[in-house]
Amino acid sequence: MSVTKNDVEHIAKLAKLEIKEDEINEFTSQLNQVLEYVDKLNELDTENVEPLSHPVEGENVFRDDILKNSISTDDALKNSASKTDEYFKVPKVIKSN
């Protein structure tokens, strides 16, 4: 299958692109080169090749969850300018209608 100038003009029209005559010739040539490469790839024997879900095989590396002591609520709130017994108080950022 090859791409013609009419195909490129049609694609440009569908994409609402304005392209010049010399660009039409260039795009026709480039698209035909891509299709030739795809044809070359289609010649490969992929009978026993499993499809990939990702081009690079990787493995997640998980760490163990280790419980550690955390800062107490009192220590976290002690330098706050505005607070309640358990929370930081901040200005309202959502306006209601």
Image (tube, rainbow, N blue to C red):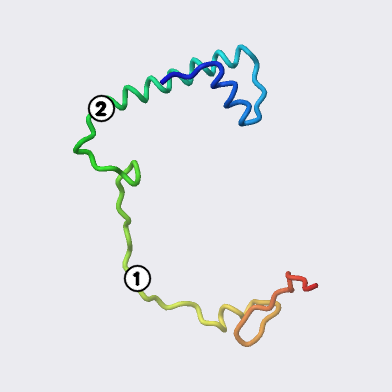
User: Are dots 1 and 2 in contact, CB under 8 Å?
Assistant: no
Give the quadrant of residue 61.
Answer: bottom left
Quarter of the rendering occupied by the C terminus:
bottom right
Q: Nearer the viewer, residue 1 or 92?
A: 1
Q: Nearer the viewer, residue 29 or 83?
A: 29
User: On the picture, is 28 further left or further right than 77?
Assistant: left
At 63% from the left and 13% from the top, the residue drawn is: 21
- The total of numbered circles placed on residues is 2
Q: Gap between marks 1 and 2, in whole Å? A: 46 Å
Q: Sort mark 1 into few (<14), some (14-19) or many (20+) by Cα contacts within 10 Å.
A: few
Q: Nearer the viewer, residue 92 or 26?
A: 26
| Vertical relation: 32 (above or below) 59 | above
Q: Specify the label residue 96 is tagged with.
A: none
At 19% from the left and 38% from the top, the residue drawn is: 48
Element assignment for label 2: loop
At 54% from the left and 18% from the top, the residue drawn is: 27
Element assignment for label 1: loop
Q: Residue furthest bottom?
A: 85
Residue on which the image places disc 1: 65
Q: Sort mark 2 into few (<14), some (14-19) or many (20+) by Cα contacts within 10 Å.
A: few
User: On the picture, is 7 further left or further right than 18?
Assistant: left
Q: Amino acid at mark 2?
A: Leu
Q: Amino acid at mark 1?
A: Asp
Residue on which the image places disc 2: 44
Closer mark to the observer between disc 1 and disc 2: 2
Quarter of the rendering occupied by the N terminus:
top left
How far from the left and from the top, in percent, is residue 6? 56, 18
How far from the left and from the top, in percent, is residue 8? 56, 21
At 65% from the left and 16% from the top, the residue drawn is: 20
